[in-house]
Amino acid sequence: MSDFESKTLKAVTDNSFLFLKEALGRLLERDCEYQEIDNELLTLTCAELQIALELAVRATIIRKIGIAGVLKEDQKRLSEEEIYKHYKNKTLKLEDFDKLKNFLKKKNLTSLVKKEFHEIDRFQLYRNKIVHFACAFSDDDLFNLRDDILYYIVHVVLVLLSEDTKDESPTDYLQRKLSYDFYQRLKKYTPYIRAMERYASKMTDPVWTCIGCFNRTYSPEYDYCYVCGYETLIGYRRVDCASCGTKNSVIYDHLDIHNEGNHHRMNGMCLDCEEKTEVFECPECGEAHDTIMDWKHIYCREGHCINKE
Ligand SMILES: [Zn+2]
Ligand SMILES: [Zn+2]
Ligand SMILES: [Zn+2]
């Protein structure tokens, strides 16, 4: 990618974030989550989100195939120098959004699948109704629209924007782009969390409770929380849960378990059923289990290692 292309890519991406942040910021400030969303807020949010999406689509195409990808047919085959000249003279002709969107879909340039492209079309319809025709919605509609909007932000716009985050996790990237404080506020906005929970269960199976943020957004498969970016701390281990039967889901602090006075026991919590329990870890052989499991006394106990008999 040439210098000109990476500068353009950065500018387009930053602009997309600008509109996204404006839309999200207004939601965070003005939305009373437990009532229907108000019409004015909806209108402004939809308009800005559409701009954020259009920019995110352009950014994706520039990143994947270069700047020529977003230009009109008669400028597509120009040399980079000529493209730059047009840019300087402000005579670059950008391809329409619909064409770019279909191109993205046809060429499989993103991880978005058919369903999300369908969401893009649906959202565009909404936006047209709301912004151009000032359609009034029923209270029920307005209630659902909030979730639709957040679904759209999380499952479509943010996916496009954070697809190529290189050395950063998507949550670190978002935090950097939106600013730390802004991201902390976003993490407290329930509609965002609900959308993230749906996103996590689409991306990975199973999804458990995160002990960093206590949302249902932690993936044991990737050891990653989709909301707070939590990864298991060094020294934490997991054993099977006696309450729900899930394998390897009770987390406990292995580093402190043998401290004096602990009797090789430590509090544990199941990340699946959220039951709090106690874990025993044998100081002789290292075997560990949820103590509820041991009603038959078939596991190691303090002073009695079943593997050293
Ligand atoms: Zn978390
Ligand atoms: Zn459990
Ligand atoms: Zn043992």
Image (cartoon, rainbow, N blue to C red):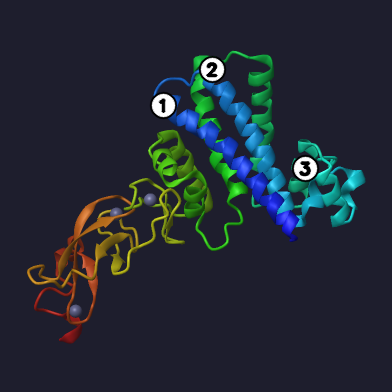
Q: Which residue is mark 2?
A: 39
Q: Is residue 268 left or right of residue 25?
A: left
Visible residue check, residue 156: no
Using the numbered discs, state the Cα–Cα distance from disc 3 to disc 1 in whole angstroms.
34 Å
Indicate whether 98 appears above or below 166: above
For ligand 1, tell me if the residue under mark 2 lies within 8 Å.
no
Residue at image point 34% right, 48% down: 213
Q: Is residue 124 left or right of residue 260?
A: right
Q: Amino acid at mark 1?
A: Glu
Q: Which residue is mark 3?
A: 100
Q: Amino acid at mark 3?
A: Leu
Q: Which mark is residue 76?
A: none
Asked whether the residues under the numbered discs 3 and 1 touch, taking CB atoms below 8 Å apart as contact, a structural biologist would say no
- Sequence-earlier tag: 3 or 2: 2
Q: Which residue is mark 1?
A: 33
Using the numbered discs, state the Cα–Cα distance from disc 3 to disc 2 in whole angstroms.
30 Å
Q: Residue furthest right?
A: 74
Q: Nearer the viewer, residue 97 or 283?
A: 97
Give the SS element for disc 1.
loop
- Quarter of the render that holds ligand 2: bottom left
Residue at image point 32% right, 68% down: 234
- Sequence-earlier tag: 2 or 1: 1
Crowding around mark 3 (Cα neighbors within 10 Å: few <14, some 14 to 19, many 20+) is some
Quarter where residue 231 is shown = bottom left
- Could you tell me residue 135's position as x and y percent? 63, 14
Quarter where residue 243 is shown = bottom left
Residue at image point 29% right, 66% down: 236
Visible residue check, residue 186: yes
- Sequence-earlier tag: 3 or 1: 1
Q: Amino acid at mark 2?
A: Asn
